[in-house]
C-alpha cells in the first residue's frame, strides 16, 4: 500500500489558506511577509520531492499550481512526477500540457484504489477540501507540517471539523527553527 502524505504550511490556529501570496485572502503571503526566512526550515520540502512518487491535489490547487509550478526550478522534480487531480468538474481539456502526466480522479474511492496500487509515497499539496475528505475517509497516513507562529483567524483550515471519532497521531519528527517555525511530522495511528 502506498503512503498518502499531506504536506502543509499552517498557522498555529490551523489556517493553510494562501501561504504563498494567492489572491483573495486577507493575510495572503503570510509565510514570507510575517516571518523571517530560515532556509533550514524548508529541508523537508526538498526531501518531499525526493521521496514522493506522485502528487495528489484538488481542482482548485491544481488550477493555482499548474500555471506556475512547471516552470519553477525549485519544483523541477514534480514536473516529471505523475499528478492526480481529484475533481468532479475538471475536464481533460483544462489540463496543462507542460507539467507531465496528469490523471483526473472522480472520487475518494478512486484515491483509495490509487493507494492500493504499486508505487511509493503520494504527496498532497494544498487542497483544503480534499484534505478534509481524505481525513474523514481515513486515507491520510502522514502529515508534514510547517507550523508558523501566527494566528490568522479566518481562513481555510487544514483539518476537518466533521464530528467524528478521535484520530490519534504519533509525532515521528520535529524541529523548532530560530524564526519560531516548527516542523512537525505525524503518522496516523490505525
Image: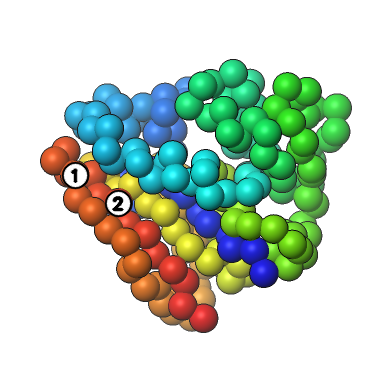
Q: Which residue is mark 2?
A: 183
**Which residue is rendered at x = 71% and y = 42% of the image?**
82
Give the camera-side residue of 95 and 29: 95
| Above/below status of 88 relative to 40 | below
Residue that lies at the very extreme toward the front in this rendered image:
50
Residue 162, how many percent across, how many down? 52, 67
Q: Quadrant of residue 104?
A: top right
Give the camera-side residue of 109 and 53: 53
Residue that lies at the very extreme toward the top in this rendered image:
71
Whichever of labels 2 and 1 marks the residue nearer the N terminus, that label is 1
- The colour scheme is rainbow
**Which residue is rendered at x = 78% and y = 50% of the image?**
105
**Could you classify mark 1 by the number of other residues whose Cα lies within 10 Å: few (under 14), some (14-19), or many (20 or more)?**
few
Residue 74, how many percent across, how many down? 48, 26
Disc 1 is placed on an element classified as loop
| Above/below status of 177 relative to 97 | below
Q: Which residue is mark 1?
A: 177
Number of residue marks: 2
The reply to whether residue 24 is visible in this rendering is no
Give the camera-side residue of 179 and 117: 117
Residue 174, how many percent across, how many down? 27, 58
The reply to whether residue 178 is visible in this rendering is yes
Disc 2 is placed on an element classified as strand
Amino acid at each position: 500500500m502506498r503512503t498518502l502524505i499531506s504536506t502543509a504550511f499552517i498557522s498555529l490556529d490551523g489556517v493553510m489558506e494562501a501561504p504563498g501570496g494567492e489572491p483573495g485572502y486577507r493575510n495572503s503571503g503570510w509565510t514570507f511577509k510575517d516571518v523571517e526566512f530560515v532556509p533550514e526550515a524548508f529541508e523537508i520540502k526538498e526531501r518531499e520531492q525526493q521521496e514522493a512518487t506522485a502528487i495528489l491535489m484538488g481542482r482548485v490547487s491544481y488550477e493555482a499550481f499548474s500555471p506556475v509550478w512547471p516552470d519553477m526550478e525549485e519544483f523541477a522534480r514534480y514536473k516529471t512526477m505523475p499528478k492526480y487531480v481529484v475533481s468532479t468538474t475538471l475536464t481533460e481539456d483544462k489540463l496543462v500540457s507542460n507539467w507531465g502526466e496528469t490523471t483526473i480522479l472522480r472520487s475518494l474511492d478512486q484515491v483509495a484504489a490509487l493507494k492500493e496500487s504499486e508505487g511509493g509515497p503520494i504527496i498532497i499539496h494544498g487542497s483544503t477540501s480534499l484534505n478534509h475528505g481524505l481525513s474523514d475517509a481515513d486515507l491520510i497516513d502522514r502529515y508534514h507540517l510547517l507550523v508558523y507562529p501566527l494566528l490568522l483567524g479566518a481562513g481555510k483550515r487544514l483539518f476537518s471539523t466533521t464530528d467524528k471519532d478521535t484520530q490519534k497521531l504519533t509525532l515521528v519528527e520535529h524541529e523548532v527553527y530560530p524564526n519560531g517555525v516548527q516542523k512537525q511530522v505525524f503518522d496516523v495511528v490505525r
